[in-house]
Image (cartoon, grey):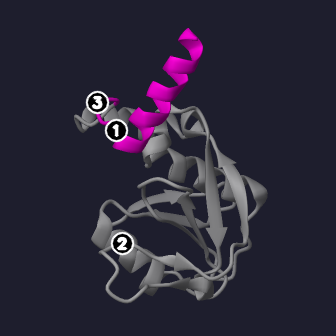
Amino acid sequence: RYRSFTSPAGLNILVGRNRTENERLAVRVATGADVWMHARGCPGAHVVVRASSGGIPTPECLQLAANLAAFYSDYRHNGKAEVTMAEPKHIIKPPNAPLGAVKLRQELGVLVGLPDNVPEEVKEYRGQSGLGDTFEGPRARRIRKGRNLRARA
């Protein structure tokens, strides 16, 4: 169902694979002490660090989750991305919003996600799936194009 990873502290990290899973993760699955994450300002996967089972997310756990959020977003090729964190109680589904779209009442904080720092097996699996580096969303293309234009000037 969801992509599932184990954090350095042994906590479960869930990553949505599509809009339906993203919405379910944000609105139904994330509860209590869990931490929800998403790459700021671009389409991407919702990530939930499952801390409601009694574990406490360490900074290493949160960094791994932020790296995964950046890796499974349009910022995958940018080297780094801002990743928003929030408590599940502050995530709301606006009326008539498209599938997977949520709104935050309050942020828990922002981390810098480094998509290149995900485990190697994640990169290998993405390459084997045929998705590899071939997909780049429209926002990432605009950012890359802007950087190329500034570099030439």
Q: Earlier in the sequence, mark 3 or mark 2?
A: 2
Q: Earlier in the sequence, mark 3 or mark 1?
A: 1
The N terminus: image quadrant: bottom left
Question: How far is mark 3 from mark 1, CA to CA?
Answer: 14 Å
Label 3 Cα neighbours within 10 Å, binned few <14 / some 14-19 / many ≥20: few
Quarter-of-image position of residue 114: top right
On the image, numbered disc 2 is attached to which residue? 100
Q: Secondary structure at mark 1?
A: helix
What is the x, y in percent for residue 117? 60, 36
Q: 73 or 52, which lies in front?
A: 73
On the image, numbered disc 1 is attached to which residue? 125
Q: Residue at x 50, y 18 (%)?
A: 148
What is the x, y in percent for residue 67? 58, 47
Q: Which dot, 1 or 2, sits closer to the camera?
A: 2
Say whether residue 148 is magenta: yes
What is the x, y in percent for residue 115? 55, 39
Question: How far is mark 3 from mark 2, CA to CA?
Answer: 23 Å
Is 6 above or below relative to 23? above
User: In the rendered structure, which segment of residues is drawn in magenta?
Assistant: 133-153
Q: Secondary structure at mark 3?
A: loop
In the image: residue 59, left or right of residue 124: right
On the image, numbered disc 3 is attached to which residue? 134
Residue that protrudes farthest toward the left in the picture: 130
Quarter-of-image position of residue 22: bottom left
What is the x, y in percent for residue 10? 63, 63
Say whether residue 45 is magenta: no
Q: Residue at x 69, y 82 (%)?
A: 54
Q: Is residue 3 visible?
A: yes
- The chief SS type of the magenta part is helix
Label 1 Cα neighbours within 10 Å, binned few <14 / some 14-19 / many ≥20: few
Residue type at mark 2?
Gly
Is 151 above or below relative to 140? above
